[in-house]
Image: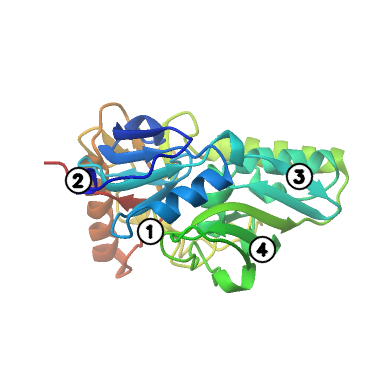
Amino acid sequence: MTHALALPTPRGPLTADRPLADLTWLRVGGPADWFFQPADEADLAEFLRALPPEIAVFPMGVGSNLIIRDGGLRAVVIRLGRGFNGIEVEGDRVIAGAAALDAHVAKKAAEVGRDLTFLRTIPGSIGGAVRMNAGCYGLYVADHLEEVKIITRQGETKILPAAVLNLRYRQSDLPEGAVLISATFRAPEGDPGALAARMAEQLAKRDASQPTKERTAGSTFRNPAGFSSTGRADDSHELKAWKLIDDAGMRGASVGAAQMSPMHANFMINTGGATATDLESLGEEVRKKVFQSSGITLEWEIMRVGEPGR
């Protein structure tokens, strides 16, 4: 248990037994043994350096693509806040703090004529977007990322070129226990008005096809095709997760208060009062039915962490 070990005293708030449900978009999950909000980079580095090596660390973004199980996390959950959400534009480079929201980065870049519009409709923050190589409309973080700045589990600050992360569909290879603190993107030039119009169109398309007003966590499963929507009219649907779920008769299926959205079959929603167990059980039922119907095993896109409820 992490409670039995002496923790360093940082400058930022460090809270024991912090419930995490209110920090995830699905509003589920038990407590973290410890919850740390570093004051700045130096505070985070010093804390990790002094933290006993046997204590696990879990960096948490805005909880947009995450199920924390009902028993919570036996770890120090690290959540970056105001000191880590800056966005700077230098020529064609956009440097964004890990806590900056994807949508804010897209908008700020567009205002000065730099095109990172693919980020506009991606829920969450830059740290999570890099870790998951987030993408839509046929573009991914990998297409624009130049380098990232991390603090390792040992408390060292390092700059890593994008190539080292081995970015692929919804995956990356960040060092174990490292906390990503900023990312630098190369952004092509574009007309600010045209970029703003494109983002408005993307938002309208998203809101028309996805349950954006519900408690959801974005796409539940990865597309077996190995790519996101390209946004083109000729985009093939055969190997899209939503189509396989639909074909298996699981659109609108529910367990307790967890439901696969009737609006978009690959979106899981908490209709009110669902537990993490409800959500995960529903997901596993969907995987089973899709396998029976198509022979394809869906892989979770939502990250699931922590202990089951007791």
Quadrant of the image occupied by residue 196: top right
Q: Disc 2 designates what residue?
A: 4
Residue type, label 2: Ala
The residue nearer to you, when weighing 91 against 238, is 91
Badge 2 or badge 3: first in the primary sequence: 2
- How much space separates mark 4 and mark 2, taking CA atoms? 38 Å
* Horizontal arrangement in the rendering, residue 19 relative to residue 164 (left or right): left
- Measured along the vertical axis of the image, is residue 108 above or below residue 128? above
Name the residue beneath numbered marker 4. 147
Does 183 sit left or right of 3 as displayed? right
- Please report whichever mark, 1 or 4, sits nearer to the chain's N-terminal start: 4
**Residue wearing tag 3:** 88
- Using the numbered discs, state the Cα–Cα distance from disc 1 to disc 3 in whole angstroms: 41 Å
Instruction: Kindly indicate the quadrant of the structure image that contains residue 163.
Output: bottom right
Q: How is the image coloured?
A: rainbow
**Label 1 SS:** helix
Whether residue 261 appears in this view of the structure is no
Could you tell me the amino acid type at mark 3? Glu
**Which residue does the numbered mark 1 point to in the structure image?**
244
Q: Between label 1 and label 3, give the one nearer the viewer.
A: 3
- In the displayed structure, 263 sits above or below 231; it is above
Q: CA distance from mark 1 to mark 2?
A: 47 Å
Per the model, the C-alpha gap separating discs 2 and 3 is 42 Å
Q: Residues within 10 Å of mark 3 (few under 14, many from 20)?
A: some
Q: Nearer the viewer, mark 1 or mark 4?
A: 4
Q: Is residue 195 left or right of residue 238?
A: right
Q: Amino acid at mark 4?
A: Glu
Circle 1: is it few (<14), some (14-19), or many (20+) Cα within 10 Å? many
Q: Earlier in the sequence, mark 4 or mark 3?
A: 3
Residue 227 x %, y %: 54, 64
Check whether the beta carbons of the residues at disc 1 and disc 2 lie within 8 A of each other: no
